[in-house]
Image (cartoon, grey):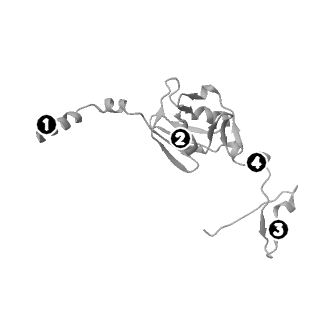
Amino acid sequence: MKRRDFLSTIGAAALIPPALSAAQKTPGATVLYDGRAIALDRISPDPAKGDALWISKTDLPRINDFELKPQGACRADVCIPITAAMMRGAYFNLSAFARRVGQRVIADSAARVWSFGEIPVVRGAFLESRLAPDVSIPDRKGRNVRLSQFRGKKVLLVTWASW
């Protein structure tokens, strides 16, 4: 190909409207979870709900460490049953899963960014029972005192760190 023909071809490609070239690409998204920003190459659009996030099933472990198994979405010893409506081919409705587990979601579908809060079922049993974990700290005289020694009493625990 001659240089002149090449340059005219490249010039013609530059005239293609951006909307056409964007329509041919599969859109991506960014998910914010647990202090991380996870870039997704592909998501599936949901014409019924513009704010629903349908991700590739293979991306789920990268986002929140859950894995799809026959018994549901599982992470360590926690398995959440999922419905057939939450899956569509190779895609999984992460927004519906978040609603199911009581996770807070903020979505900006125009900017293609979804932010997910903590998952209540995996954040620790002490939050559910309202019992603080047992800690041991030195008192002013240097003796170790355990929080469990004050069980049933009101305690104000003040800590400080130099960093």
Q: Which mark is residue 145?
A: 3
Give the labeled residue for mark 4: 125
Counting from the top left corner in percent of width and height, residue 103 is at 64, 39
Label 4 SS: helix
Cα distance between the residues tagged 3 and 1: 82 Å
In this rendering, which labeled residue sits more in front, label 3 or label 4? 4
Residues under numbered marks 3 and 2 in contact, where contact means CB atoms less than 8 Å apart = no
Label 1 SS: helix
Q: Earlier in the sequence, mark 1 or mark 4?
A: 1
Question: Local crowd at mark 2 within 10 Å, few (<14), some, or many (≥20)?
Answer: many
Q: For this rendering, which residue is in front, 82 or 162?
A: 82
Label 2 SS: helix
Give the labeled residue for mark 2: 59
Give the labeled residue for mark 1: 5
Cα distance between the residues tagged 2 and 4: 27 Å
In this rendering, which labeled residue sits more in front, label 1 or label 4? 1
Instruction: Identify residue type, mark 3.
Output: Val
Say above or below: 60 vs 50: below
Tell me the residue at 38%/33% (across/down): 25
- The quadrant of the image that shows the N terminus is top left
